[in-house]
Image (tube, rainbow, N blue to C red):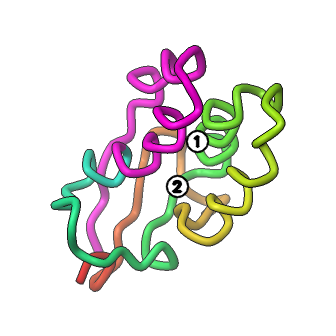
Amino acid sequence: MEIKRLNINQYRDYKEKDLQTRINLMADVYKNFGWDGESQINPTKVFLSEEDSVELLEIMTNDNKDPESMGIKLLWMNKGASTDRKLKKGKVRLLKGWMK
């Protein structure tokens, strides 16, 4: 198990970006954790705090202002990190095998 830091502030300006850039936010977050951009990610082994998870989803959906918000939420459900209510804001837990 590895604990990483997540600085949500570095992603806040994504909210003002176009849809594709906001969708790419998920990849950018994983790259920040050490993802090489090609390996398979197992999102069930990546944990964010509940607060960070909600905040990232709000950024990706532009606070639900886009008609595509539902599609982005489904993408997050399938490929986004898991949530751990015990984790403190700004902390990420990566379990062994999170990236193959």
Magenta segment's dominant SS is helix
- Vertical relation: 49 (above or below) 78: above
> Quick check: marks 2 and 1 in contact, CB under 8 Å?
yes
Q: SS at mark 1? A: helix
Please tell me in which quadrant of the rendered image residue 95 appears: bottom left
Q: SS at mark 2? A: strand
Q: Residue at x 49, y 15 (%)?
A: 13
Dot 1 crowding, Cα within 10 Å, few <14, some 14–19, many 20+: many
- Give the camera-side residue of 68 and 61: 68
Residue 15 forms part of the magenta stretch: yes
- Vertical relation: 51 (above or below) 34: above
- Position in image of residue 30 (x %, y %): 34, 54
Marks 2/1: CA–CA distance: 6 Å
Locate the N terminus and report the quarter of the image it occupies: bottom left
Locate the C terminus and report the quarter of the image it occupies: bottom left
Q: Residue at x 66, y 51 (%)?
A: 50
Please tell me in which quadrant of the rendered image residue 38 appears: bottom left
**Left or right placement of residue 98 versus residue 67 in this view:** left
- Vertical relation: 34 (above or below) 43: above
- Position in image of residue 29 (x %, y %): 38, 46
Q: Residue at x 55, y 61 (%)?
A: 80
Which label belongs to residue 52? 1
Q: Residue at x 46, y 49 (%)?
A: 26
Please tell me in which quadrant of the rendered image residue 7 appears: top left
Q: Which residues are magenta?
A: 1-28
Residue 7 forms part of the magenta stretch: yes
Which residue is disc 2 drawn over? Answer: 48
**Left or right placement of residue 94 versus residue 48 in this view:** left
- Position in image of residue 74 (x %, y %): 72, 62
Which amino acid does the dot numbered 2 rest on? Leu
Which label belongs to residue 86? none
- Position in image of residue 59 (x %, y %): 62, 30
